[in-house]
Image: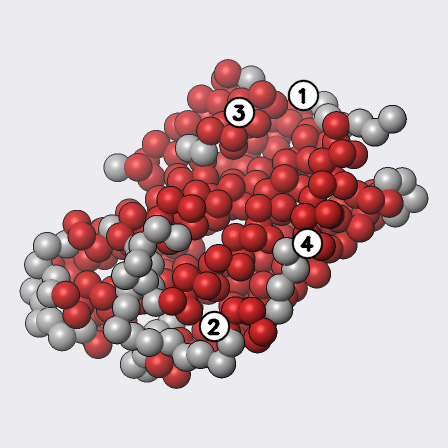
Amino acid sequence: MQTEAQTRYARCLENSRRIRWDIDRDVIRGREFDLSGHFLPDGLSMVSRLPFLGAADARLLSQIQGRTYANIFGLVERWINAKVLELSREHWLGDQVALEALVGFSQEELKHQELFRRIERMMADAMPPGYTAVGRAEDVATLVLGKSSWAVLALTCNIELFTQVHYLESIQPDSSLSPLFKDVFLFHWKEESQHAILDELEWTRCDARLTPDERDRAVDDLIALVGAVDGLVTAQAAADVAYFGSVAAGPFRREQLGAVEESVRGAYRWQYILSGAQHPRFLKLLTGMITPAQVERVTAALAPLSR
């Protein structure tokens, strides 16, 4: 008789087979980016908090944030794929359904990386020159994979869960967005829905093997990873606003550009950290694994990011 975990691995594998898609046939379909629409919805970009922006500049800022949004996913999926391949080794001689589900997960993450590389080239062709992506995928992956598997899986689960919320609550309902941009994240969401479940299964499996001291050190690793993500998105916010200031219609006073950077930094902290950390499923999983004192440490680390 199958355990609940085995049933969930099998269901993920079945769903993955059912919704499998192709970059050219299903997503791009011969299209280019049309800059007449927004890329990232206001629920994520928070552009409406900047009332001094004209319509064209508000749309431009949403497009810059959307470009970064795609690039960040391409970046994080480099370490996610490496970790999934590492974890699959533990199933080599065991549950073959779990192994196939994780191998499929890896193949989908490789496809996503290629999708986001393609999308970046297409956005670069459509948008004015001068955009800079701050992080290198290899460097970020090396830093993340240097931490404990528990912490890496916690961060990964956070990310996979917030992709669900972002698409369903913000991207999918917004009719003002570029149709191509929406389709990129529609198809991304379809596969990430399975990945979030596999992350949870692997995270809880990893947690069951830890001693209390190992888990306590892993909590420190998670806090360090949150700090690293914040450093990355803070630097990217500064780069994105510098690019915005150089290509926007404007003109803007120095204090206005400062307000744009503060808004974009807050939007990025929400997008890439807080929206996942506050997800009910993530909170239930995390607080079920760690002590109240450890929860307080994580909460204290997150508190400055919401100001």
| Mark 2 or mark 1, whichever is nearer to me | 2
State if disc 1 and disc 3 touch (CB < 8 Å).
no
Return the residue nearer the eye: 41 or 250: 41
As shown in the figure, which amino acid type bears the numbered disc 2?
Ile
Which element is circle 3 on?
helix
Going from the N terminus, do you reach mark 4 or mark 2 first?
A: 4
As shown in the figure, which amino acid type bears the numbered disc 1?
Pro
As shown in the figure, which amino acid type bears the numbered disc 3?
Lys
Report x, y in % for residue 92.
88, 47
Q: How far apart are the alpha carbons under marks 1 and 4? A: 40 Å
Q: Which residue is mark 3?
A: 284
Q: Residues within 10 Å of mark 1 (few under 14, many from 20)?
A: few
Residue at (61% x, 33% y) in the render: 218
Q: Which residue is mark 4?
A: 18
As shown in the figure, which amino acid type bears the numbered disc 4?
Arg
State which quarter of the image contains the N terminus. Answer: top right
Report x, y in % for residue 14.
73, 47
Q: Is residue 273 visible?
A: no
| Badge number at residue 212 | 1
Q: Residues within 10 Å of mark 3 (few under 14, many from 20)?
A: few
Going from the N terminus, do you reach mark 3 or mark 1 first?
A: 1
Describe residue 53's horizontal placement relative to residue 75 as left or right.
Answer: left
| Mark 3 or mark 1, whichever is nearer to me | 3
Going from the N terminus, do you reach mark 2 or mark 3 first?
A: 2
Q: How far apart are the alpha carbons under marks 2 and 1? A: 44 Å
Q: Residues within 10 Å of mark 2 (few under 14, many from 20)?
A: many
Q: Is residue 103 above or below residue 300?
A: below
Q: How far apart are the alpha carbons under marks 2 and 3? A: 35 Å
Q: How far apart are the alpha carbons under marks 3 and 4? A: 29 Å
Describe residue 11's horizontal placement relative to residue 231 as left or right.
Answer: right
| Mark 4 or mark 2, whichever is nearer to me | 4
